[in-house]
Amino acid sequence: MDESPILSVKNLAVTYKTRKGEVDAVRDVTFDIRRGENLGLVGESGCGKSTVAYAMVNFLGSNGFIKRGEVQFKGESLRGRSEAELRALRGGDISMVYQEPMSALNPSMRIRDQLAESLITHRGFAQKDADAESLEALKKVYMPDAEGVMTRYPHQLSGGQQQRVVIAMAMLNNPSLLIMDEPTTALDVTVEAAVLDLIAELQRKYNTAALYISHNLGVVARVSDKVAVMYAGEIVELAASRDIFHNPQHPYTQGLMRCLPDVDAPKGTRTLYPIPGRVPSPANLPQGCIFAPRCEQARDECTVDHPALIEIEPGHQVRCLRRAADWEAVKRMWAAADEPALEPCPERPNPAGDAVLNVEAAKVYYPVPFQTVGGLFGLEKRKYVRASDDVSFSIRRGRTLGVVGESGCGKSTIAKAIVGLEPLYQGKVDFLNVDISKPLNRRGIESIRELQMVFQDPNGVLNPSYTIGEQIAFSLRRFHTVPPHQVRAEVERLLQAVKLDASYYNRLPRQLSGGEKQRVGIARAISTNPAMVVCDEPVSALDVSVQAAVLNLLLEIQNTQHTTMI
């Protein structure tokens, strides 16, 4: 690996201008990335990971700017570069993969044209050659029906397909630096593994450097040579990947590790351990160590003095007034202090008809548009796409059914059919001894109240014109869950349950991060005290601490209310 850094960041501080004044979102960030090296950047939502990525190419919006510090790429400063110079870098020598693919795709252009545009602009390809290269790029990211995808618009693709397009676009020009902001969040595990292998292959072949931002610690452990842990705008620990995961020294890093579930524990018998509290607002940081209010190891001096990032051993830097206890000792301390394991739901008798949900031979078919005018007059046989075919299962009260499979296997389709958002072609769905095979608008209000869903993409279910509080309150009022005078208090309780404070009541969806939007979706789903919740990737957009809190919440609801879940 080349020892000279291709990207060097020194004492970076990023500030945003707001109505209440300037807010320092990122402070004193320093790191290097060498050719062929992968630096993982981890931390909870709101810690400034994406801001650091956008600062690399000065893509901070009209109200954001680099207040101080230096960003050098290939030995030359990126500060003070003109917009034309930065535009030439973006998509060329520096490529980015964004967390939300639709923010990087033009909704009015076909995929073929968007991929080809990058090759034509940055490498001078002819249209025919650009089309051929674009098709090959889609095949490299294992895009099903790559030829067909080339002719489609972004809205005609699934979230996973959109993300694969963005990854293919980023790799087209063989960049020297690849900046990836949650690049595999929308992908299933098999495609994720293939894409990670592809990124590793690109790095080996072209000696590409990478900045990999993710809340998925398992992925970061797999792909990264070094890991920087961010908290509230600062790097609190920076070390080789093996040291971060096997010998973490900062209490925050140790807390992230504790959030991970124990796969060997029996289902429903062990509590997950989220980090208490929330990431502070950059406009209202605590005095002293910014992690002290949430730290189990904090002392009096931690609330007074702000620690510097110091090297405790070669290549291992920690921002802590006291070196954390030995990792094995910390784990022993946690084991001794563990709360009693949750008692699982008591087994219920299973007489005939005790199943909450019965799905029998459910089929969801989508009609293919007629290819000729004759089809409109019955001269052409109708063809169908079999999204879900002959699906049957039943679930008893208080149980959880896990449904797994690759993208396109029909998991979300059958989930939407159960809640009435997709029509059944054939088959039957029986819920609480009532036939609900009919569409949602023909179901009874009680069936709707008792059967709720948490969607994979929160952006598609939150109305951008209404506040978060109003949208949760709507469900409470519609189903008369609580008396009218208690609606506000109940909404705040639900927000608190998913680790959002009461101030979110008056916020609009655009003011929330992706993880925060997902938490709102979960709060709204459980607001009606449903008998069953269908969860479609409910924690895929959340960082590990919030994942632990949400899974604890779902487990608590199931244990106390015998809620059934898919």
Image (cartoon, rainbow, N blue to C red):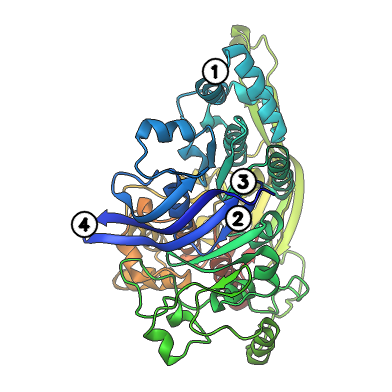
Q: Is residue 364 visible?
A: yes
The C terminus lies in quadrant? bottom right
**Residue 40 image-quadrant placement:** bottom right
Question: For the residue labelled by badge 4, is the local secondary structure a helix, a strand or a loop?
Answer: loop
Question: For the residue labelled by badge 3, is the local secondary structure a helix, a strand or a loop?
Answer: strand
Distance in Å between CA atoms under marks 2 and 1: 31 Å
Question: For the residue labelled by badge 2, is the local secondary structure a helix, a strand or a loop?
Answer: strand
Work out whether mark 2 precedes mark 4 in sequence or the reverse, and give the earlier one. 4
Work out whether mark 4 precedes mark 3 in sequence or the reverse, and give the earlier one. 4
Q: Which residue is mark 2?
A: 39
Q: Position of residue 472 (x, y in %)?
A: 39, 60
Q: Position of residue 284 (x, y in %)?
A: 31, 71
Say which of marks 4 and 3 sits in front.
Answer: 3
Distance in Å between CA atoms under marks 1 and 3: 24 Å
Task: Identify residue type, mark 2.
Answer: Leu
Q: Which residue is mark 1?
A: 124
> Quick check: marks 4 and 1 in contact, CB under 8 Å?
no
Work out whether mark 4 precedes mark 1 in sequence or the reverse, and give the earlier one. 4
Q: Position of residue 494 (x, y in %)?
A: 43, 70
Residue 543 versus residue 428 in the image, above or below: below
Task: Identify residue type, mark 1.
Answer: Gly
Given residues 309 and 173, the one toward you in this image is 309
Distance in Å between CA atoms under marks 4 and 3: 38 Å
Q: Which residue is mark 3?
A: 209
Say which of marks 4 and 1 sits in front.
Answer: 1
Residue 19's tag is: 4
Q: Residues within 10 Å of mark 3 (few under 14, many from 20)?
A: many
Given residues 406 and 206, the one toward you in this image is 206
Task: Identify residue type, mark 3.
Answer: Ala
Q: Position of residue 37 (x, y in %)?
A: 65, 51
Residue 382 versus residue 414 in the image, above or below: above
